[in-house]
Amino acid sequence: LQRTFVMIKPDGVRRGLIGEIIGRLERKGLKIVAMKMTRIDKQIAHKLYEEHVGKPFFNDLVEYIGSGPVVCMVIEGDEVVKVMRTMIGATDPKEALPGTVRGDLAMSKGENVIHASDAEEKAKKEMSLFFSPSEIIG
Ligand code: GTP
Ligand code: MG
C-alpha cells in the first residue's frame, strides 16, 4: 500500500470544487488518511515547488498558490502515486483527457485545480511539509 500527497489548489477551493474532487477520490476507492485546509506562504511554496525555482512561471506560480486557502490531503491506496497522477490529468488542462480532474474541471495551465506528487520520494517529502506523523490516521 502506498501514500501520496494531494492538494486542491486555490482556484479549486474558490470555485467550490472541494466536494467534487474528494468525491472522485472516494468513488475511486482511495482512502483519505489526512486532510487540512491551510494557506501556502512564499517559503512553503519554494519547498513544495523546489524543482521549478528560477523558471519563467515561478513567480506567477507562487502568487497563484498563495492566493487563497488550499485543501491538503494524504491519500492511501495500491500504487496511489501513479493512480492519482492519472486521475488528475496533464498539467495543461487543455490537453488533459476527459474523465480526469483537469480535463473535466479546468482550462488554464496556470490555474489547474489540483496537485499530486509525481514520485514516491516526492510524496514523502511533500506530506511532511504539511502533516506531522501523528496527523496521518492509518
Ligand atoms: P503539480 O501537480 O502542481 O506539480 O503539477 P504538474 O506536476 O502537473 O506540473 P509541474 O510540476 O510541471 O508544474 C507545477 C505547476 O506549475 C503546474 O501545475 C502549474 O500550476 C504551474 N505551471 C507549470 N507550467 C506552467 C506554465 O508554463 N505557466 C504557468 N503560468 N504555470 C505553470
Ligand atoms: Mg509537479
Image: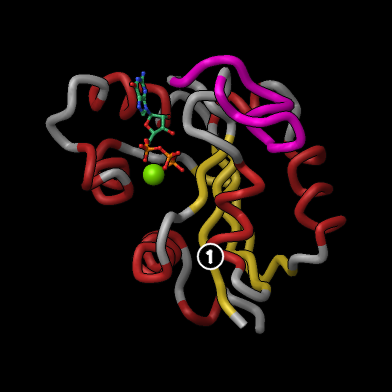
Residue 136, image x and y in percent? 58, 76
Is the residue 121 above or below the residue 24 in the image? below
**Magenta-colored segment: predominant secondary structure:** loop
Residue beneath the point at 43% across and 55% down = 118
Dividing the picture into quadrants, the one containing residue 54 is top left
**On the picture, is 122 further left or further right than 85?**
left
Ligand 1 is found in the corner quadrant, namely top left
Quadrant assignment for the N terminus: bottom right
**On the picture, is 37 further left or further right than 20?**
left
Question: Over which residues does the magenta segment extend?
Answer: 95-109
Residue beneath the point at 63% across and 59% down = 83
Residue beneath the point at 39% across and 60% down = 126
Dividing the picture into quadrants, the one containing residue 46 is top left
Instruction: Look at the image and say whether residue 103 sits in the magenta stretch.
Output: yes
Q: Mark 1 — residue?
A: 4
Residue 100, image x and y in percent? 69, 37
**On the picture, is 8 further left or further right than 120?**
right
Is the residue 69 above or below the residue 115 in the image? above
Residue beneath the point at 63% across and 65% down = 75
Extreme residue in the left direction: 54
Residue 93, image x and y in percent? 57, 24
Instruction: Look at the image and say whether residue 51 sits in the magenta stretch.
Output: no
Residue 45, image x and y in percent? 31, 41
Residue placed most toward the observer, 4 or 133: 4
Mark 1 burial class by Cα count in 10 Å: few <14, some 14-19, many 20+: many
Colouring used for the render: secondary structure
| Amino acid bearing label 1 | Thr
Quadrant assignment for the C terminus: bottom right
SS of the residue at dot 1?
strand
